[in-house]
Amino acid sequence: MRFDILTIFPALFSSPLEEGILRRARASGAMSVHLHNIRDAAVDRHKMTDDRPFGGGEGMVMKADVLASCLHRVREQGPPGPVILLSPRGRRYTHAMARELAAEKRLILVCGRYEGVDERFCRRYVDSEISIGDYVLTGGELAAMVIVDSVTRLLPGVLGCADSARKDSFSRGLLKHPQYTRPREFEGMTVPAELLSGDHARIREYRFLESVRVTLERRPELLAGVEFSREEMRLLRRSGLADRVERYRTGHEQ
């Protein structure tokens, strides 16, 4: 996977890309990140990438001609790939979207700034706009790093354990079950007996039910899209969770 990031602050990416899984993924060749300073495409003496908005108003708007010039240069350096603008008005980012993006060979991420990007650039060049949440950042750089991180961990071989990403929160619409490690007792709290039983089937059942409980408590709307097997429904009925789950899945409880 190749990531190309268009930004006026390329130095913001230096530290995150040199740590942990991202560093290892780059070293292994599973992915590469190419940073492009949008200012390098500006032709005026001050290397301006933004200007005042027509019609007046506060703030500045990123210039369509400078962005287009930068993008043209970037496109020449690799295979085709979708152009994604990180913007608060974009579709809200989800795990399902991350899986879709992980199937691409290349992603071109444009980091918006200021009051936004000239609409003519968006209409001509942007394939999709993505927002990582219902809030406003000072720029698209942090959002771009979220895309890079979440997509990279889904690439084959990056996590080491082939099953790890498949069991993530949101992978099937459920939040992940609680996790525990040593010591067995901490400030009067102990590890659940099921996890100490050595019975793998019992542990799987416990974790599944805890995952459903956490989802019911924190993100019950996710249950509307979850399909449960016959065995899972049996466990839910036995635990007393089946009725609550069904109410959310059928839209009878909000």
Image (cartoon, grey):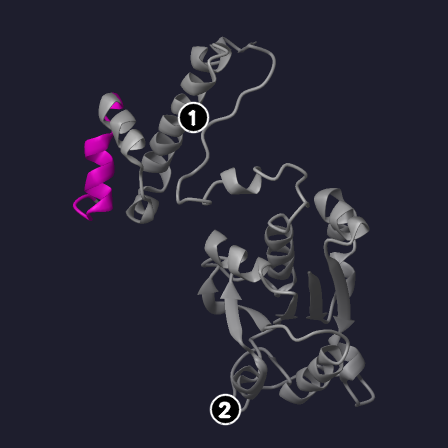
Q: Which residues are magenta?
A: 239-253
Is residue 147 inside the magenta stretch? no
Nearer the observer, 72 or 199: 199
Vertical order, 228 against 87 (above or below): above
Residue 52 seen in this snapshot = yes
Q: Measuring 63% from the left and 48% from the top, which residue is drawn there?
A: 153
Locate residue 215 relative to residue 241 in the image: left or right: right
Q: Position of residue 110 (x, y in %)?
A: 64, 71
For image coordinates 69% across by 80% down, the residue present is 71
Q: Which mark is residue 251?
A: none
- In space, the residues marked 2 and 1 are separated at their CA atoms by 57 Å
N-terminal of the pair, mark 2 or mark 1, is 2
Q: Is disc 2 surrounded by few (<14), some (14 to 19) or many (20+) residues within 10 Å? A: few
Instruction: Give the amino acid at mark 1.
Output: Arg
Q: Secondary structure at mark 2?
A: loop
The disc label shown at residue 55, or none: 2
Residue 94 in view (yes/no): no
Please tell me whether mark 1 sits on a helix, a strand or a loop.
Answer: helix
The residue depicted at 49 percent of the width and 59 percent of the height is 97
Residue that mark 1 sits on: 207
The answer to which image quadrant residue 141 occupies is bottom right
Q: At which x and y percent is residue 77?
A: 77, 76
Residue drawn 73% across the image and 53% down it: 30
Residue 173 appears in which quarter of the rendering? top left
x, y percentage for residue 4? 71, 68
**Residue 243: x percent and y percent?**
19, 33
